[in-house]
Amino acid sequence: MKKNHYILSNVQLSNGTSVDIEVKDGLIKTVAKDLSGADVIDCSGLIALQGFVDLHTHLREPGFEQSETILTGSKAAAKGGFTAVHAMANTMPVADNAAVVEQVYALGKSAGYVQVQPIGAVTLGLSGTQLADLGKMNASQAKVTVFSDDGKCVSDSLVMRRALEYVKAFGGVIAQHAQDPALTVGAQMNESELSLKLGLTGWPGVAETAIIARDVLLAEQVQSRLHVCHVSTRGSVDVIRWAKARGIAVTAEVTPHHLLLTEELASEYNPLFKVNPPLRTQDDVLALREAVADGTIDIVATDHAPHPADSKDCEWGEAAFGMVGLETAASIVKTTLVDTGLIDWVRFEEVLSTNPAKISGLTDQGQGIQVGSFANIALIDPATKFKVDAVSQSKSSNNPYLGMDLSGEIMHTIYRGTFTVKNSEIQNLGAN
């Protein structure tokens, strides 16, 4: 629905204030009470939040379009309340040069549902050995500031140090997939008594924690910025908390699935629950929730990882790692953190919008619902309870939440003043 001038009436902000929001020509013009003079859209009962920003999305294009495209992933993101996503570099060809990141950026603009911001690879071909041309990717039209070999760990300490030193010059950040490869050869699930019982090779939590410990010390040594992807264990939380107390420039993310699901779901060998890092224990889940609440973990990021059916409809050992997550992320945060009293709506907005935009330096996102900002808005119904079904905008269906009960549904998403989702239906925008 394209409207140049309208008013969102009777809407609640994250701080509990009830207001009207006037939007004109893509910007927030007025935030006040009892506004008039434009088309009025009644938003009674809805909470208006700054559009969500995902710092960790796999859009698969170029190279793996059988799993997802930038267009289908953008639609899934919009349905979930996102107005910006960061596309990971493990495509084919790898986004390790200016040409590929500019291609991803252009395809995102053409789709028009959300801002698609490419993440550049740290090393050429995700090899872990030779740095990619980080400077050229930053100087490109895509203005890449976040670099990650996600899916693989930058395990060589010297390469990691050089990467941290390189991005310091332009205020970039290295986002690390913390997984010591020597400790996780053939790993299939969390290392525990359950993995022994099931006969599956274990992925020990220390393989994550040890890399994080090394990397925060490297970041401190070179005075550069480190971001830790998909934190999954209590031990990792402890290291990050220590590093922040020491003043090290580290930020961290947790995924919705690590806030909700546990290793017990591996018991029936259903590959929908196979993910990297693996689902951990209930104690780890509680530690992660507490870390979001106290600020140790800065953001929630989806790690949306679509796969075609044949990559999941097979034996556990042969199945691909990963889950889709864009469309359900906000509802899982609402269910696990807001409904349990651990966080309020202000913190909700921080972890899903303000903080991820700040980490990556997006100037069009995360500015809050204030006069003069782009109208990037997610409208959520906090009272709605629903059962997750198979209807999806994603090209893939590897959804671990099917049939689960969640609360808080995204009703409308507005990107730069245009409704990309209205009444939970995707609008046909065409090119933007």
Image (tube, rainbow, N blue to C red):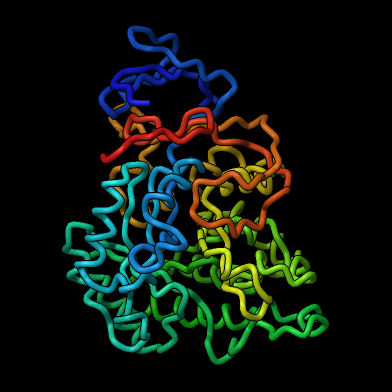
Residue 159 is left or right of residue 236, and the answer is left
Above or below: residue 47 compared with residue 348? above
Q: Residue furthest bottom?
A: 182
Q: Residue at x 27, y 40 (%)?
A: 431
From where the camera sits, is residue 14 visible?
A: no
Q: Residue at x 31, y 33 (%)?
A: 373
Number of numbered discs = 0
Name the quadrant containing residue 400. bottom right
Q: Residue at x 60, y 36 (%)?
A: 409
Q: Which percent across, then down, holds residue 288?
A: 64, 61
Q: Residue at x 49, y 31 (%)?
A: 412
Residue 80 is left or right of residue 273, and the answer is left
Above or below: residue 125 compared with residue 243? below
Q: Which percent across, then down, holds residue 167?
A: 27, 71
Quarter of the picture holding the N terminus: top left
From where the camera sits, is residue 234 visible?
A: yes
Depth check: 338 or 179 in front? 179
Quarter of the picture holding the C terminus: top left
Above or below: residue 59 compared with residue 188? above
Q: Which percent across, then down, holds residue 53?
A: 43, 48
Depth check: 249 or 272 in front? 272
Above or below: residue 100 compared with residue 49? below
Q: Which percent across, then down, holds residue 268?
A: 79, 69
Residue 265 is left or right of residue 26, and the answer is right
Name the quadrant containing residue 239. bottom right
